[in-house]
Image: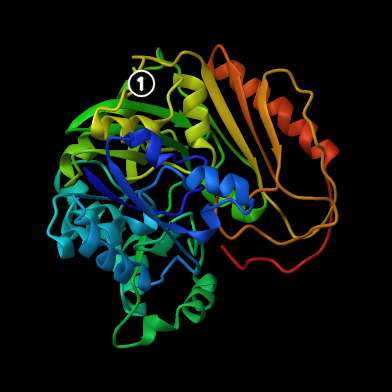
């Protein structure tokens, strides 16, 4: 089979050539940022591909699609793989232009457009919070008048918590309107508003193959949220215990959402579910993406299950020795991300002595000028931990946080990334 792969993930983490197998021709169009700078590493990682194109300025570069269609004239691709949040629709458009099977653009849009997704989920009876599309300022004002504050406003096709804002009072409206002048244009904006819930956030990750769920497992972020990173607060996540009654409920709700949406036959998925901290609001579905969760979730689940989800997915596509999937985690695992905050990084530890910490990584050097994080995966350090239970993992994370904040010194002040 001849595959076209559209890639922006570091290639040492996505060995498409090895995972799909040498019996197949794999042509790669990749973001230059995903390729090692070292010439020997670069040559080794690219050696197994039938053809490689390395593209600068990859993100919204329309030339990527032109290049893909030109390559199709030579290679006559049979499958197109595009696994990034920002390439799902690009891949679907290419499949349709090449007249080859796969997830069509209309269906892929339901996983990229948060408004379209929530409409489908609500119609299927999956619980969601009140929401509305926002094209103009009047749409937002109408929603607030009906549902009150607080509300969250976000791009309908965003990712990484970029440009997500929580409005808690009327005096915060003028600032948001000033940051979105398209709300006053005839063409309008492409935003979503929904009721904001103080919540515990669960993410549920897994693999769908040939319409069957191969793996689905929830983790809890406790009292931390994805927006905390942009406020300079660390976030954490811990896999749920098999015997926790919530575990099966979260798995079932995620499968219901997959069944309601026009999901691809095979993909990696990442869902988010809220539970209200008010003691009255039950589980409500936030969203689901047909891609791997970010921020070390992939590494945490590999620690827990002994399986790397993208590798399982790619090997399963061609029957190239997909690894067995245990019914339950082999061990409990957790992660934490330490974000930057405005100032100068004076001191940050190189190694971590806390028992139970499996991996500790430093991502910034002393002397670095820091600003607030702009996306929910931007960090100065991160760690993976293991334990026999969720409770034990959370204990390790708590000790790790105390140690890190004692040992890290950031002096104020530098410009911030803007309001939330």
225 vs 20: above or below = below
Asked if residue 273 shows in the view, the reply is no
Considering the image in quadrants, where does the C terminus appear?
bottom right
Does dot 1 land on a helix, a strand or a loop? loop
Q: Is residue 370 above or below residue 201?
A: below
At which x and y percent is residue 25? Answer: 29, 45
Determine the residue located farthest toward the bottom in the rendered image: 186
> Which sits in the foreground, 95 or 369?
95
Q: Nearer the viewer, residue 354 or 275?
A: 354
x 55%, y 58%: residue: 33
Q: In the picture, residue 296 is in which quadrant? A: top right
Q: Position of residue 229 (x, y in %)?
A: 61, 50
Left or right of residue 236, residue 242 in this image: left
Determine which residue is flagged by label 1: 323
**Location of the N terminus (image quadrant):** top left
- Residue 126 pos. (x, y %): 22, 41
Instruction: Say which residue appears at 30% left-offset and 64% top-offset.
Output: 68
Q: Is residue 364 left or right of residue 387?
A: right
- Seen in the picture, residue 181 relative to 370 is either above or below; the reply is below
Residue 236: x and y in percent read 58, 35
Q: Who's the residue at 23% across and 56% down the image?
A: 75
Q: Quadrant of residue 183?
A: bottom left
């Amino acid at each position: 089979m001849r595959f076209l792969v559209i890639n922006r993930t570091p290639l040492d983490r996505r060995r498409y050539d090895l995972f799909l197998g040498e019996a197949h021709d794999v042509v790669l169009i990749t973001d230059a940022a995903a390729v090692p700078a070292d010439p020997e590493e670069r040559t080794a990682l690219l050696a197994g591909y039938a053809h490689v194109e390395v593209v600068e300025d990859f993100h919204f570069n329309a030339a990527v699609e032109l290049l893909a269609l030109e390559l199709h004239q030579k290679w006559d691709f049979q499958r197109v793989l595009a696994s990034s949040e920002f390439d799902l629709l690009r891949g679907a458009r290419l499949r349709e232009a090449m007249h080859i099977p796969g997830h069509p653009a209309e269906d892929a849009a339901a996983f990229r457009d948060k408004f379209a997704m929530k409409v489908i989920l609500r119609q299927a009876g999956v619980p969601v919070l009140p929401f509305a599309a926002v094209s103009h300022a009047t749409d937002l004002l109408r929603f607030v008048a009906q549902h009150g504050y607080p509300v969250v406003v976000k791009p309908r096709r965003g990712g990484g918590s970029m440009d997500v804002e929580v409005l808690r009072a009327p005096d915060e409206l003028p600032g948001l309107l000033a940051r979105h002048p398209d709300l006053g244009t005839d063409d309008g904006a492409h935003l979503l508003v929904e009721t904001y819930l103080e919540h515990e956030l669960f993410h549920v990750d897994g693999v769908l193959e040939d319409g069957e769920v191969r793996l689905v497992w929830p983790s809890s972020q406790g009292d931390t949220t994805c927006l905390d990173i942009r406020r300079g607060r660390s976030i954490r996540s811990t896999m749920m215990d098999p015997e926790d009654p919530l575990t099966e409920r979260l798995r079932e709700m995620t499968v219901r959402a997959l069944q309601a949406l026009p999901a691809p036959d095979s993909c990696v998925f990442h869902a988010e579910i809220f539970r209200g901290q008010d003691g009255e609001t039950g589980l409500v579905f936030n969203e689901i993406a047909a891609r791997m969760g970010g921020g070390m979730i992939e590494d945490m689940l590999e620690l827990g299950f002994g399986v790397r989800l993208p590798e399982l997915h790619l090997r399963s596509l061609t029957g190239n020795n997909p690894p067995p999937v245990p019914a339950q985690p082999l061990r409990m695992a957790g992660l934490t991300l330490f974000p930057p905050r405005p100032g100068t990084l004076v001191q940050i530890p190189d190694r971590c002595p806390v028992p139970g910490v499996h991996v500790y990584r430093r991502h910034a050097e002393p002397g670095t000028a820091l600003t607030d994080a702009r996306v929910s995966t931007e960090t100065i350090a991160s760690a993976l931990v293991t334990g026999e239970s969720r409770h034990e993992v959370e204990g390790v994370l708590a000790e790790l946080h105390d140690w890190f904040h004692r040992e890290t010194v950031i002096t104020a002040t530098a410009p911030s990334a803007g309001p939330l």
